[in-house]
Image (tube, rainbow, N blue to C red):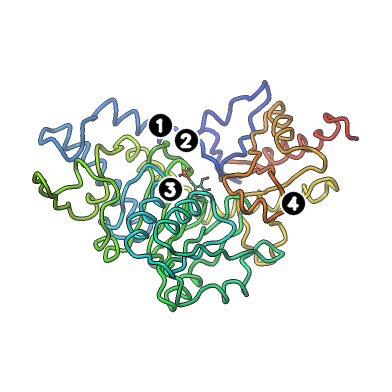
Amino acid sequence: MNKNFLNDFPILRGNMNGQPLAYLDNGATTQKPESVVRSICGYYGGCNANPHRGVYELSVKATKIYEDTRRKVAEFLNARPQEIIFTKNATESLNLVAYSYGLTNLHAGDEILITIAEHHSNLVPWQMVARATGATLNYIYLAADGNLNEADIAAKLTKRTKILAVTQISNVLGLINDVKTLAARAHEVGAIVVVDGAQSVPHIAVDVKDLDADFLVFSGHKMLSPMGIGVLYGKKKILDAMPPFLSGGDMIEYVEEQATTFAELPQKFEAGTQNVGGAAGLSAAIDYLRGVGFEEISRIERDLTNFAVAELKRLPYVELYGCDSTRDNKIGIVTFNIRDVHPHDVATILDAQGVAIRAGHHCAQPLIKFLGQTSTCRASFYFYNTRRDIECLIEAVERVRSVMHLD
Ligand SMILES: Cc1ncc(COP(=O)(O)O)c(C=O)c1O
């Protein structure tokens, strides 16, 4: 029997539109346990000061919270502390790589390879950098089961590929890509590998050394932490050779009238006052996740996913996407449409029944187009969800067509 996580998440015990809340939009952001909220309040209530700048006790305490969190994140990902850069979110981390590494290292004739299943955050920055450098942006498309098309990988990962940027788990299909194998193949042709871990780091154990990722990004808010803190992991040797992305206070060594030398890692990439409250929350979130354990998190989410898919498959008017993988690599996300009903109508009808799901293109328009759709419904789970939440989803879905006077 699961620990009753709901005790730690008062918001999940609440109502929406007068109905018990079934929060199934965890792919967008997760709820925060009380320990995380306490940690943020404790920082602002007890030791708020600008980190790295003061010699007085409060500032030293703020610096310690910030740097201790960096060490904790490093250990969490199996990296070194200098390899952990704090950012606002996964999007900023990806922009940092695209602009700092991409603009410096890409030239006309080079190729950037991504998949059609990328979130816009791992797509638009590469379009921008391709345009600025004359590089070409190529796509790996999907096989019928939603997994990456093997023939496409073989044809497109070539000596011209300088960057392979790939999501570890698709935010629409919930399919886990075999990033370790992809990284090994990319390294064979001399490409560097950027892993979008926004949907994986919160849900499965991620070891950057084992994956041999050159860069990996994630957002704190999708794993119990507050919004406004994200992480970029990068191999030290690569980060050392990259120019700063943002410049200003804190990222410098010496500034003269016409020139500046830059701080060592990680400060070189952390310009301006940093989000210590966010770091305090992220630290508590990692503690919480470790307390649950990733084996347990994955087990719960797979169970919920399988249950939801099986229940939705029973309904003849529901079309599911990415639910036919035979590789047992689906976790946490179920995307579907209801015949003849627009996803926004579905989400609104579910909202009235206390069920929070996402409708739209999920910041992955090229993927939605590839699936032959303009938008879809997405239910996304976290370990604190229960089978009861899925039952609420199914009951609400079963009512949609009659509310729309289609049955
Ligand atoms: C796979 C993936 N990558 C990147 C992002 C961007 O995350 P953020 O908006 O926190 O920067 C998301 C957010 O949904 C995502 O699902």
Left or right: 277, with 109 as reference point: left
Q: Earlier in the sequence, mark 2 or mark 1?
A: 2
Measuring from the top left, give residue 390's x and y in whole percent. Answer: 69, 41
- Measured in 3D between alpha carbons, the distance from the residue under mark 1 to the one under mark 4, in whole angstroms, is 36 Å
Looking at the image, which is closer to me, 128 or 394?
A: 128
Which residue is disc 4 drawn over?
320
Residue 54: x and y in percent read: 13, 35
What's the residue type where badge 1 is placed? Val
**Is the C-beta of the residue carrying label 3 under 8 Å from the nearest atom of ligand 1?**
yes
Picture coordinates of residue 105, whole percent (x, y): 34, 65
Q: Going by the image, does 325 lie left or right of 110?
A: right
Q: Are marks 2 and 1 in contact (CB under 8 Å)?
A: yes
Residue at (39%, 45%) from the top-left corner?
A: 230
Q: Earlier in the sequence, mark 4 or mark 3?
A: 3
At a point 77% along the width and 47% down the height, the residue shown is: 312
The residues bearing labels 4 and 3 have C-alpha atoms spaced at a distance of 27 Å
Foreground mark, 4 or 2? 4
Q: Quick one: SS at disc 3?
A: helix
Crowding near pointer 3: few (<14 within 10 Å), some, many (20+)? many
Is residue 293 visible in the rendered structure shown here?
no
What residue sits 47% from the left and 61% below the top?
165
- The numbered disc on residue 37 is 1
